[in-house]
Amino acid sequence: MQNLKEKYLKFFESKGHRIIKSASVVPENDPTCLFNTAGMQPLVPYLLGEKHPLGKRLCDVQKCFRLTDFDGIGDKTHHTFFEMLGNWSLGDYFKKESISWSFEFLTEVLKLPKEKLAFTVFEGNEYVPADQESFELWKACGVSEDRIAYLPAEDNWWPSMEQFGPCGADTEIFYWSDASSPAPKVFDPKDSRWVEIWNNVFMQFNHLPSGEFVELKQKNVDTGMGVERTTAVLAGTDDNYKTEIWLPIIKDIERLSGKSYEGHEREMRIVADHMRAVVMIASDDAGIRPSNTDQGYILRRLIRRIVRFAKKLDIDVASAFEEPIIDTIVSQFKDYYEEVERNKGVVKEVFAEEKNKFNKSLENGLKEFEKVLAGFDRKEEFLRRTDPNAKVERKITGKTAFNLYETFGFPIEMTEELAKERGYEVDLTDFAERFKHHQELSKQGSDQKFKGGLADSSEQSARLHTATHLLGAALRKFVNEDIRQKGSNITPERLRFDFNCDHKLSGEELKAVEDYVNEIITKNLPVTYSEMTVDEAKKAGAIGVFGDRYGELVKVYEVKGYSKEICGGPHAKTTGELHHFKIVKEESSSSGIRRIKAILD
């Protein structure tokens, strides 16, 4: 794993790319997502034309989460947290260099045999012609025409033909994963043995609301290669969990459970996957803690699922079973993300606290289960008094089973087992229907929160982004000078700002904060920025948001005398553009974290 990442970064550095650090797991400029789902999301302002401090050629390893199939984790290839290798051209090189370098890296650096590679390109439609250029470029690399397939927009267009804004054709790279048979001469994209390992997106067009696709002035290249999947390819296995990335974690789980991976694959994969995701979320400087909303809700669900499946593996969840697994994961990632090592104690504390709460919830669930059975007993006793031959259907309804699942975290298997021990059945059909409806509702929400794409960069969003800086300055002045941003979500209508604070803000504090922000607005001060190193920014008194995410050079936005922060933008040009600031709500986000929602009139 480490070797793949090092080779990738070193290769693209040799091609003039600057290595940038991974951004936080929480997107700064994209209100449509709870987490960064791809390497491109932190770079949205630069893909839209803003100048990046490190230039036009960039590469990195980005922490990513995709949770739209949360309950489906447990197969060989899917993960909640994963790492994405990416290289970008921000208006610099385009298809020729991107394709030739991809081929060079795969065949000359990773030594993948050319005869096991295949490629797809956009077939064209009534709006945009076929990507003949990419087809010819792959041929120029020595690829047979039989190994290049033209596919429609749903396969080879990003983000989709329906979405407006920057977009373009992509070309995907596949590897033949079946070690037992040679790769067929003709590439069949429907054959699942061809595994996608890399995707190169060419942002060439702007999709206008009129429906027209016009050429962009700044054409970008955005690529993505999953570390986990490519590592499995290099290892010659179709099971990601049998690679060097996962084996140390699986070994910990085997030792703790006294069981072998074979025969318990699904349970061990879920525990391993979710433990890694918990470490990466809880160690992030965004300060996410378990809660009932947004990122905190995902963290809570992950920990609770770990406990459930650890129980199925007969792991003693009352013990500190999680600590050696956390130590293993931290040792794997500390060289790439220093916050993982720095916040290891926080991760252990967060996990133990939520685990203990869930164990208590399970106890309450067992009490609720006993109440349900007691109700059946009373009904049966009553009927027997009136009719000695009467029979009570000893069947727990799907509604009751789903309530135990949703409220107390009871997996259906646990309800079934407990019911069987007492001579009852469970209406699994009704439960399945209710669970399916629950999943559909969750997926609808997830699709909105995890859809990705280029975020809103309207003038209103830029104004609200600047307002968060002024809000932070006001909170530090009137509440506590140690307050720092712990999360931010901006839509065109409002801002949401999470910050560390140990108490609910009083009416007086809120008024002072609001008045102070409006005082700065009325002065119509310029919002300026300058580029400098991280050390220079810190010496200048700039506040960093979520750590040093942009690499050697950073942008520091300043409202002289009031606010100075490391940030990627976008921003208003003057404070007067904000017009008027109003706090509409102040509430708890999670333990030790408060949340303010505000608007600009």
Image (cartoon, rainbow, N blue to C red):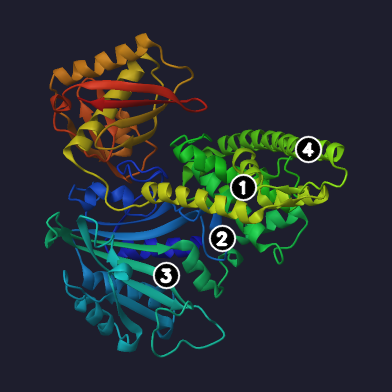
Q: Earlier in the sequence, mark 4 or mark 1?
A: 1
Q: Answer left or right for 218 relative to 181.
A: left
Query: Of the residues shown, which amino acid type is indicated by label 3?
Result: Ile
**Mark 2 — residue?**
245
Who is closer to the viewer here, 562 or 219?
219
Q: Answer left or right for 240 relative to 222.
A: right
Tag in front: 3 or 2: 3
**Mark 1 — residue?**
305
Badges 1 and 2: C-beta atoms under 8 Å apart? no
Q: Earlier in the sequence, mark 1 or mark 2?
A: 2
Q: Earlier in the sequence, mark 3 or mark 1?
A: 3
For residue 345, the mark is none
**Mark 4 — residue?**
379
Query: Of the residues shown, which amino acid type is indicated by label 4?
Result: Lys
Residue at image point 42% right, 49% down:
446
Tag in front: 4 or 3: 4
- Mark 1 is surrounded, within 10 Å at the Cα level, by few (under 14), some (14 to 19) or many (20 or more) other residues, namely many
Residue at image point 40% right, 17% down:
480
Name the secondary structure under disc 3.
strand
Q: Earlier in the sequence, mark 4 or mark 3?
A: 3
Residue at image point 66% right, 63% down:
265
Badges 4 and 2: C-beta atoms under 8 Å apart? no
Q: Earlier in the sequence, mark 3 or mark 2?
A: 3
Distance (Cα) linking label 1 and label 2: 21 Å
Of the 4 image quadrants, the one containing the C terminus is: top left
Distance (Cα) linking label 3 and label 1: 29 Å
For residue 197, the mark is 3
Name the secondary structure under disc 4.
helix
